[in-house]
């Protein structure tokens, strides 16, 4: 038996190939949308990808099931409760473990018959059970399910199915640390049922009502694109190759400006420091160096055209990673990047970045209003006195609450999210400063933090 994990760090997403070495038949479970690595692995190991399985209709990324169907001839399998536009074979209880934190969700038992025909070697748990956490039940409102109802299905799956497995069964989930599909996902990429039975807070003995109350409370904000992706994963759509072939086209500066005037979103994917130095007025910065897809999906609208500005050679990566979350409405990229604006300084802006010491002096003088875009949990560990907490995930919806009589001094933990926030606020007409290096730089400079909210 072959059981190979593939991990996509930027989305904290794990996918798998399960194969029989003798027959060469293979199944890919929860694939990412760009599928070349699965095809390469299959070729290297003389495997045929005959099946592609979705443990559920994912909300945080677009899966590569249609790509594997079209390029490898794989048959698509989904949970029996899933409703899809494309042809798919339903999976129900028996060779798989049914139910989960979404109604169509399944878990897959993997048997290594060379070792045991009755004891499962591993279970692929999708978003039902993670290392250190369980799936969140609040992501499928657009599909007509309440968080309470899904939490009860999750409780049943965990306690009557997964916890009934042998302690030695390996646990391979669909996501790891950094994913918004749970609250406290561990950094380990696999575990065992026995270990999770001992350490996972959500598997401790408790009543169903207590479990429901726990897993429906205090979940992190989910980007709005999660609902969009969950629906899109059930639909027939263009493959990523066709999408990139259409989108990967250079645009003149005049064409970009015309699209921007017509309402297109301009996404600058360069490093925050480069963006701060000079950028096209009205553009948004989400750098490729961080959780690019997650934050692009948070601040952009998937149905509105997008124009990309990026460093030379980063065009395909910028657009491929948008495609992984189903943002397929890219009109093209600015040919030449910022060099196209070299003789148009009237179209560019910069973002003033303050050192911690200069920022402290401006705060003490009452010259700025501090806006902290970290999460409430991060602020609980220490914050700048007098700062306003507005998590980046909510910022676009809460700009009306921010003052306009003074510049806003924006910060996060290290500078990545604050650059996104500064670009968003600047595009809405606010005068913005940015704390260079975020709270990490503030603390390194020996400046004080307080507690509060």
Image (cartoon, rainbow, N blue to C red):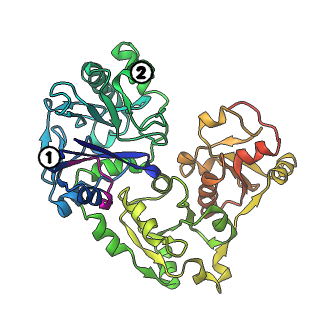
- Secondary structure beneath dot 1 equals loop
Position above or below: 43 against 449: below
Q: Is residue 426 magenta?
A: no
The quadrant of the picture occupied by the C terminus is top right
- Quick check: is 28 in the magenta stretch? yes
* Mark 2 crowdedness (10 Å alpha carbons): few <14, some 14-19, many ≥20: few
Q: Is residue 338 shown left or right of residue 93?
A: right
- Residue corresponding to mark 1: 22
- Count of labels shown? 2
Residue at the spot 49% in from the left edge and 30% down from the top edge: 218
> Which span is picked out in magenta?
27-37
- Quadrant position of residue 270: bottom right
Residue 83: tell me if it is visible: no
Q: Which mark is in front, 2 or 1? A: 1
Mark 1 Cα-neighbour bin, 10 Å: few <14, some 14–19, many ≥20: few
Image coordinates of residue 402 in percent, x first then y, are 66, 49
Instruction: Identify which residue is drawn at 27% across, 21% down.
Output: 166
Give the residue pinned by disc 2. Answer: 213
């Amino acid at each position: 038996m072959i059981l190979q994990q593939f991990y996509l760090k930027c989305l904290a997403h794990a996918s798998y190939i399960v194969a029989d070495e003798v027959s060469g038949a293979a199944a890919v479970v929860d694939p990412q949308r760009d599928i070349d690595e699965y095809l390469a692995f299959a070729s290297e190991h003389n495997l045929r990808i005959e099946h592609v399985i979705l443990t559920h209709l994912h909300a945080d990324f677009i899966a590569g099931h249609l790509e594997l169907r079209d390029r490898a001839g794989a048959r698509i399998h989904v949970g029996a409760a899933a409703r899809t536009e494309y042809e798919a074979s339903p999976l129900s209880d028996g060779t798989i473990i049914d139910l989960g934190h979404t109604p169509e969700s399944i878990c897959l038992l993997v048997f290594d018959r060379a070792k045991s025909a009755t004891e499962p070697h591993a279970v692929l748990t999708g978003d039902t059970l993670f290392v250190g956490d369980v799936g969140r039940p609040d992501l499928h409102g657009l599909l007509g399910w309440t968080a309470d109802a899904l939490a009860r299905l999750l409780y049943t799956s965990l306690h009557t199915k997964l916890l009934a497995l042998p302690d030695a069964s390996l646990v391979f989930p669909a996501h790891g640390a950094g994913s918004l599909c749970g609250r406290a996902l561990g950094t380990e990429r696999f575990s065992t049922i026995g270990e999770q039975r001992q350490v996972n807070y959500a598997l401790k003995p408790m009543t169903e009502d207590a479990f429901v109350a726990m897993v429906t409370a205090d979940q992190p904000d989910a980007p709005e694109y999660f609902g969009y992706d969950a629906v899109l994963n059930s639909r027939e759509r263009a493959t990523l190759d066709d999408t990139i072939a259409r989108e990967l086209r250079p645009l003149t500066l005049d064409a970009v400006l015309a699209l921007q005037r017509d309402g297109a979103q301009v996404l600058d994917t360069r490093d925050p420091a480069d963006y701060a130095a000079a950028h096209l007025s009205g553009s948004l910065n989400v750098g490729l160096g961080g959780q690019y897809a997650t934050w692009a999906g948070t601040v952009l609208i998937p149905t509105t055209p997008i124009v990309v500005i990026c460093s030379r050679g980063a065009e395909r990566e910028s657009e491929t990673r948008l495609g992984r979350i189903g943002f397929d409405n890219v009109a093209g990229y600015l040919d030449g990047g910022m060099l196209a604006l070299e003789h148009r300084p009237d179209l560019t802006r910069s973002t003033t970045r303050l050192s911690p010491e200069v920022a402290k002096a401006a705060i003490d003088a009452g010259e700025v209003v501090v806006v902290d875009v970290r999460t409430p949990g991060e602020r609980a560990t220490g914050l700048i006195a007098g700062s306003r907490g507005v998590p980046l995930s909510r910022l676009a919806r809460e700009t009306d609450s921010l003052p306009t009589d003074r510049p806003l001094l924006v910060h996060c933990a290290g500078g990545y999210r604050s650059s996104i926030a500064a670009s968003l606020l600047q595009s809405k007409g606010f005068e913005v400063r940015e704390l260079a290096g975020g709270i990490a730089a503030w603390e390194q400079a020996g400046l004080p933090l307080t507690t509060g909210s």
